[in-house]
Amino acid sequence: MAKKKINNLEKIKNLLEKLSNAHGISGHEKEVRNILEEEIKPYVDKIKTDKLGNLIATKNGGKPSIMIAAHMDEIGFMVKYIDEKGFVYFAKSGGWFDQTLLNQRIFIHTKKGIVLGVVGSKPPHIMKSEEAKKVIEIDSMYVDIGAKSDKDARKIGVEVGDTITLDRKLESLSNEIVTGKALDNRAGLTIMIEAARILSKIKTKSEVYFVGTVQEEIGLKGARTAAYSLNPSVAVAVDTTIPGDHPGVEKKSSSLEIGKGPVITVSDAEGRGIVVTESVLDWMKSSAKKGKISSQLSVMEGGMTDAAIINLTRQGIPSGGISIATRYIHSPVEVLDLKDLEQCAKLIVECVKSADKYF
């Protein structure tokens, strides 16, 4: 029997699934970095990991040099205290909306291996009426691992400082739409790898640095050091962004939609993040037009990407952002359209092909 041929969207989904299901909060990106290295290695000339943990994969070339950055870390938690009954209290790593955490299953990553737990709190049945109306905050939550005491919890392997991630796997919805954890920013890594694959078959003038950055969710830290070291002519941060195509969001807050193509950043965080220069915007918009790629423009009031810090490195590095509209980001059930990932990778390729005309 002939083996079924896998189309490109299925390949992209399989890669995204591998990355999304991996675990790595800020400062603990090793598992994700190993996957990135394995997947991108066939398409580049050299790979290194710097002192902070950024993975830098280089496609040799000349000028201009281009840095394509996508962060490897996901938001999560750290164990901060174990009480005498063995219940585990935790601190946030990255930006969470507290009410999305309650009653989730989680993994505690210990030296002895993964320990499964559930996030619990005082049940509503015994709350006072006024108390039951309030949003439960993280300080009132804990992790139940089934331990009998603090000594038992430590015997199981849990220690202060252990990292915690969600027990979630990528799943398909309808119409090429998928849901999973950490699509912010495993989607960006998937796009970067797909772009590297396409570019490996094309002769280009530019040297391209594909960078998996660390600690983006807690201060854009890895992008700062990587950009300082590489000092590229121009940089592009690949990330996720917020659409306004579902109930509860007005179009005036976000006109972006999933399935409508890559999102080109104009500015973010009310300009406190990045205000993209005209030359970079022209480069990206003309690249989309030349490649016949439908794209969207974004002026965001909240959130920023690695582009913000790369832009301010050294004497200033021209930088921009290309993102994927993703519903429910910073939650356990992020949602995106696989077709957007494919088109985003194509846009990056078009940008690389024409970079020498702009920088």
Image (cartoon, rainbow, N blue to C red):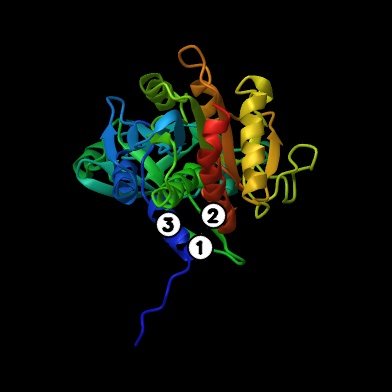
Extreme residue toward the bottom, this view: 1
Res. 178 in view: yes
In the image, residue 110 lies at what x, y percent?
25, 41
Disc 3, disc 2: CB below 8 Å? Answer: no
The residue to which callout 3 is attached is 17
What secondary structure is marked by label 2?
helix
Residue ID for mark 1: 9
Residue sitting at x 44%, y 28%:
63
Give the residue pinned by disc 2: 342
Check if mark 2's residue and mark 1's residue have beta carbons within 8 Å: yes
Front-most of residues 66 and 98: 66
Mark 3 and mark 1: Cα distance apart in space:
12 Å
Q: SS class of the residue under badge 1? A: helix
Q: Left or right: where does residue 288 sit relative to residue 338?
A: right
Q: Mark 2: which amino acid?
A: Glu
Pointer 2 local density, CA inside 10 Å: few below 14, some 14–19, many at least 20: many
